[in-house]
Image (tube, rainbow, N blue to C red):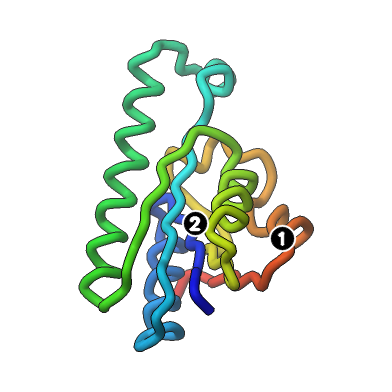
Amino acid sequence: MDAIVVGTDGSHGAEATVRKVIELAQGSEATVHLVCAYPAPGTLERLGMTSRQDSVNLRGVAADVLARDQRRLEEAGFSVQTYAREGDPADTILDVAAEAKAGLIAVGARGNTGLRRFMLGSVSSKLAHHTPTSLLIVRDE
């Protein structure tokens, strides 16, 4: 397996996912592609956030989440690429997985941060129905 895509949102479930990927892929040559999606400006209105500043803040939150998880994975010896992208989390993860030709997608069973509020339906459920690759759903420990 050359590429693993990990969906992250800063939640306990995402942290458990990063730990599980480190455990399962330790010593492999796989590159980990970390993905954190944030809502598009039109979605922000449904959340009660309407300013451009709110969108910038969410982009910053995504970048912070990615930086933290990237450090953990690099300390464990992995090569890591990060993706902070606007859009639906499941669709974004699927896009990155296709681009990276990933052999595995790993996500938490559910998120529970501010970013989760815009997720319409379960990301893991949507991935299970639409991914053409193996999917690892990690329960929070």
Which one is earlier in the sequence, the residue at label 2 or at label 1? 2
- The kind of secondary structure element at disc 2 is strand
Marks 2 and 1, how far apart in space?
Answer: 13 Å
Whether residue 69 is situated above or below residue 1 in the rendered picture: above
Instruction: Identify the residue at horizontal 49%, vertical 57% (top origin).
Output: 7
Depth check: give the residue in front, 61 or 74.
74
The picture places residue 132, in percent across and down from the top left corner, at 73, 64
Q: In the rendered structure, which amino acid carries the disc numbered 2?
A: Gly
Please identify the quarter of the rendering in which residue 81 is found.
bottom left
Instruction: Identify which amino acid the numbered label 1 is placed on.
Output: Thr
Q: Position of residue 50 (x, y in %)?
A: 46, 12
Which mark's residue is nearer the viewer, 2 or 1?
A: 1
* The quarter of the displayed image where residue 107 is located: bottom right
Residue at 45% across / 85% down in the picture?
A: 24
Reading the image, the residue beneath label 1 is 131
Q: Which residue is mark 2?
A: 7
What residue lies at 55% left-to-right and 52% top-to-bottom? 96
Tag of residue 59: none
Q: Report the front residue among 25 and 58.
A: 25
Element on which disc 1 rests: loop
Q: How many marks?
A: 2
Instruction: Rate crowding at label 2 as few (under 14), some (14 to 19) or many (20 or more) other CA atoms within 10 Å.
Output: many
